[in-house]
Amino acid sequence: MHLKKHLLFIVIILCVLGAIYFYALSDMFHPKQIASYENFTEMSEEFDASKEIAAAEKKYQSVKEPARVIKGYEKTAANVIALTFDGMDSRGNMDAILKIVTDYKWHATFFVEGVNAARNATVIKNLLEEEQLIGNYSFVGISKAERLEPEVLVEQFCRTQKILKLLTGSEPKLFRLYDTKYLDHLLRAAAACGLEKAVESNAVIYVRKLADEGTMDQFVAGIKPGMIVSLQMSRPVPITYSKKKGPDKPAIDKKPTIVDRNTVPGEEVTTVEIVKRLCGKLKNKGFTVVTVNMLEKMAAGQEAAAKVSDGLKNDKTVK
């Protein structure tokens, strides 16, 4: 009788330990952490950026050079593209996606929200250790940001800059915002926060839409060397925008070459499986993935070489 009780007790303990282990590993219990726009000021004192925000607001008034917009270079000779992941998914998914990228020996660009970076510091550390490029995706992953006033933009950018500097040791120099027109006031606000480049993608799609095989094949077919391809990992945070007092002439009106108008099929397929299939198709098409910064350098080097070549041709013609 005592033996049965002991065995029952052992079984119960094993079940409890198994449940704890499953909880620790499963993404089901680690959903993406995101704050609502209304509550985005709630963060620990460690990440307080009030001084940085005040300094950036003051600097905004005297910014002479707004952040520069960079986009794909479709005349790139090499069969390379820049792949960006916009927004942070769950901890488990982010780790799995990073492994997919590193297994191919690729270097992608990860645009992260400040609030999620602060709550998932290990993910940021892993990205840094694997030499992936980290960019600013605003504090809560906003969209249509051109409708926001400069002081709100400064706060969104600055808080993320502070968090990423504490986690990585340096501030990002580039940023990206979903479904946003890069107007002058927005680019000046970014520059005031230490951001030098705004990234405009040639192809943008919500990653869940690629669950459909036909949609994925169509998406991949439209990708050309030199493009910046962006996977939206989550839906932007819905926020209430304030009206601007006067019209602004857009510096850049984002018009992706691949239009994203599909519904979201195949919810049973995991995000990690979708990314793995997509990366496999890109690899089979001969693409190599580099960071946005590397793509820009390659294009600049190619352009410089072309100018030298043209100069030599002109010199021979003159002779």
Image (cartoon, rainbow, N blue to C red):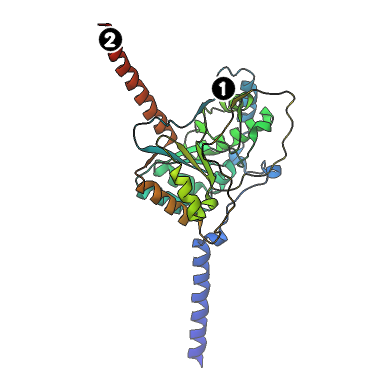
Front position in the image: 214 or 84: 214
**Residue 85 — which label?**
none
Give the residue drawn at x 67%, y 46%.
Answer: 36
Q: In this view, does 75 lie above or below 237?
A: above
Give the residue drawn at x 65%, y 25%.
Answer: 57
Disc 1 secondary structure class: loop
Residue of label 1? 66
Q: Quadrant of residue 192?
A: top right
Task: Classify residue 176 as left or right of residue 39.
Answer: left
Task: Classify residue 99 as left or right of residue 13.
Answer: left
Q: Quadrant of residue 80?
A: top left
Image label count: 2
Residue of label 2? 317
Q: Which of marks 1 and 2 is in front?
A: 2
Q: In this view, does 2 lie above or below 265?
A: below
The answer to whether the residue labelled 1 contacts the one labelled 2, judged by CB atoms less than 8 Å apart, is no
